[in-house]
Image (tube, rainbow, N blue to C red):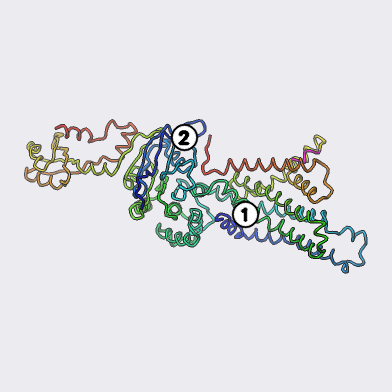
Amino acid sequence: MVLPRYAWRRLYEQRLVILLTVVSFIWPLICGGFIYLTNHVELLQGLDKDFLEFIQVNGRFFSIFMYVQAGFAVFLTALAGPSLVAPDLSNNALPLYFSRPLTRWSYALARLTVIIGMLSVVTWVPGLLLFALQVGLAGGWWFIANWTLGAAVVVGFLLWLLVLGLVAMASSAYVKWRVVAGAVSLAFFFILSGVSEMINQIFRVAWGHVLDPAWSVNRVWCTLLGVDPPDGPGAGASLLSLVMFVLLLVMVIERKLRPVEVVR
Amino acid sequence: MRLDNTPVVELDDLKVKLGRREILHGITCRLGVSGTGKAIGLLGPNGAGKSTLILTLLGFLRPSAGRARILGMDCRRNMGEARSRIGYMPENDSFVGEMTAVTFLRQMAELSGLPPEAALEKAHEVLFHVGLGESRYRELRTYSYGMKQMAKLAQAIVHGPELVVLDEPTNGLDPAARRRMLKLVTDMKVEQGMNVLVCSHLLRDIEQVCDEAVILKDGVIVHHCNLEEERRSNRSFVELEVTGDDRNLRTVLPEIGAEGVSEGAGRWRIVLPAGVEVEAIWGLAARQNLLVRKLTHRRDTLEEIFLKAMGHLAHTPGESAAIDVRST
């Protein structure tokens, strides 16, 4: 736990990280207010009946919450993620770490734990709190009928955080420069999204979406939350594409996180 | 202090490949004894395989054949245990620039297994020891090159390792900083009983701090010498230059148990027996009415040994004379 402890401290020494983390709580607070309102019908008297049916805490509500928070998580990853790995590589500190009783995998896992921990604060933790708030206000019957939503929020977000964490680490390990690594992390999602859309348009297909990790994870969330999925490949194919992304990123990290680089 | 005759480094037909190219071609040797507080020098020209050997010993590179042991532990299988007993100072800049020196050292000490409080205490202590006490709360990126070298040394010794591996420790240092670094290395072995493995191309540094030296060339060991013994043997060889009639000198030298050979023009090479100091030659020369122009111990320097090992010298200067002396 030595590495995560020091990394955690380094992380929150950055003001921008604290600022973005605070900003990331705005949407969960709004959602919290929404849950409060939906559970206090006396406050909503006089509103249109159709609208009252529309504003319900269900899978769609949590999918919107997750979609927005996932966006914050991407920016937070690009801002803070590379600061955990890139400085070690740019300053050639890895030989110092690995000359101690620390393996490459435990180093990578420690860094990944911190990134996922930092992102958890703004993703599944507030998601679970919202779920708990709804259970508290709506009662036990709501929990019995919708417990899968809570599990979906945690599992869905953890899947996304794993991808984000690995993207941040792989980009940091590859470019070794914090600012550029942050830009590469962002570009990774935007470029792949563009490429997948391009493939879909040029070949008039829908499978191009599997090249877009953001779309794939959203597709998996839709299945987990039981909401209408977007047109395109199914949840299984999307999950498979995410697994492929994860393996690819792990491969990059494995190749780059070495105490010495052998130049061929 | 452990004295169990475990070699610091034990290589058994060690071969290491980088890509398809074999860098170390089956090295076999035993260097140092664990817990004796001695320094081993690793010498060799660029590309000889010094760094490859160090990286293999640290478990960063895998041997393609053979075996490497450090402090009695296999570099392939038991590195986790070995690493907590080793300190490593790399050649290049290695630090986390955004960290203060004390935080960096504390983290490194904790990673080596020290409890947080002890690690903090040791971090302060070691930073003062290497002369960075006043600047220990500064970020490492603000340090000068010499300070960074000292910080690298500090992180290598902060957890009190049994063995410290130093890769070119005096590289880029000014003469004063170099002297300080070498003194620290000497203190480490003499006062703290640490074994030190120094990799350097600076022969004077190795000669100054090491007790044993290994010379590598093209991935093989071309020479392994005990510098302590070399120094001791050097003390018995004397070069003398006199003015006057020195014809009787050879006959009077046995009076003090010495033997000598004349090289002509008043120049002599003399072998002193054990326990006889060079002052005895002064007395002898005075009795023979000889004016001493030069009287020095022969210095079979590491440079000469190195050049000989590299094939640039046919033999060490003075070596033939020593043989001549023995034969007379």
Which secondary structure is most common in the magenta stretch?
A: helix
Residue type at numbered disc 1 = Val
- Look at mark 2 in the image and give the residue it sits on: B16
Crowd tier of the residue under label 2, counting other residues whose Cα lies within 10 Å: few below 14, some 14–19, many 20 or above: many
B75 to B95, vertically: above or below: above
- Look at mark 1 in the image and give the residue it sits on: A114
Task: Tell which of A186 and B123 is nearer to you.
Answer: B123
A259 to A13, vertically: above or below: above
Q: Which quadrant would the C terminus of chain B be assigned to in this image?
A: top left
Quadrant of the rendered structure where residue B247 is? top left
Residue type at numbered disc 2 = Val
Magenta span contains residue A4: no
Report the magenta residues as a range: A206-210
Where is residue B218? Give x, y as percent: 41, 32
Magenta span contains residue A207: yes
Q: Residue at x 28, y 41 (%)?
A: B301
Where is residue B63? Give x, y as percent: 47, 36
Badge 2 element: strand
Name the subunit of mark 1.
A
Where is residue A45? Give x, y as percent: 91, 67
Q: Residue at x 79, y 62 (%)?
A: A135
Quadrant of the rendered structure where residue B292 is? top left
Crowd tier of the residue under label 1, counting other residues whose Cα lies within 10 Å: few below 14, some 14–19, many 20 or above: many
Name the subunit of mark 2.
B
